[in-house]
Image (cartoon, rainbow, N blue to C red):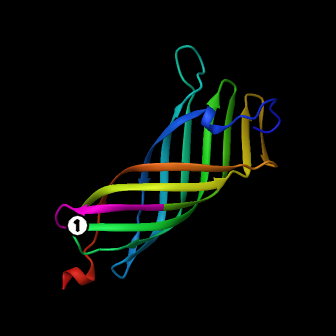
Amino acid sequence: MDGAAEPLYLYEIYKGLFAAIVEPTIRIGSRVEVGPWAQFSHAQMRIRCSAERTCKGSNLRFGLQGNYHWNPSGPIDLWSGVALGYDTSSFSVPAAEVTYSGPDVTLQAGFDRNFGGNFWAGLFVTGTGGQYDKLDVRLLNGSGSETLRERAFHLWIGFGFRVRVAAPHPAVAN
């Protein structure tokens, strides 16, 4: 945090994130998928607000994505893509709520296996890089916002399991 005697980094606050991602995308042809996405995350915190409980933290990311499906009509559908988005990371400590926000870019890849009909499931991995450019702080006696002067690159590495319900491809329907 700017103005602090020692810089405060998110890796000193967050242990990790548990995320849920919603992607209401559409297919253009059988191979290209585009659309919005949103990720809602609960943060596992390193810092404690009291002896009994940890402080609260969260992360919200959203944006637009495009994915390319390498084998859309096969039993295993490999895919890769890119997403442009906006990232907000928040945490609460006694007497203050702090939020960093800024743009990010994500590279992603995975595979989905068809389990019958329109039901697919698989694994994925993501790498996201960005820079927070804004800091918002809410205190008991007021709030403030500033543009960050010293911006550091941040990186999120993610992996997970996804479930997809897909409309049939026109090529498969014939």
Residue with the most extreme bottom position: 174
Q: Which of 4 and 41 lies nearest the eye of the viewer?
A: 4
Name above or below for residue 130 compared with residue 92: below
The kind of residue tagged 1 is Asn
Residue occupying image coordinates x 33% and y 67%: 78
Residue occupying image coordinates x 56% and y 13%: 51
Magenta residues (range): 108-119
| Residue 28 coordinates in the image, percent (x, y) | 39, 80
Q: Is residue 19 magenta?
A: no
Name above or below for residue 5 compared with residue 51: below
Name above or below for residue 142 compared with residue 163: above
Name above or below for residue 156 compared with residue 119: above
Describe residue 7's horizontal placement relative to residue 128 as left or right. right
Report the quarter where the C terminus lies: bottom left
Q: Which of 109 and 59 lies nearest the eye of the viewer?
A: 109
Main SS class of the magenta portion in the image = strand
Q: Is residue 111 magenta?
A: yes
Q: In the structure shown, which secondary structural element does the residue marked by tag 1 occupy?
A: loop
| Residue 156 coordinates in the image, percent (x, y) | 55, 49
Report the quarter where the N terminus lies: top right
| Residue 143 coordinates in the image, percent (x, y) | 76, 37
| Residue 4 coordinates in the image, percent (x, y) | 80, 32
Residue, disc 1: 118
Question: For residue 173, what is the image quadrant?
Answer: bottom left
Q: Which of 96 and 163 lies nearest the eye of the viewer?
A: 163
Q: Residues within 10 Å of mark 1 (few under 14, many from 20)?
A: few
Describe residue 4's horizontal placement relative to residue 114 as left or right. right
Describe residue 103's horizontal placement relative to residue 146 as left or right. left
Residue occupying image coordinates x 60% and y 55%: 129
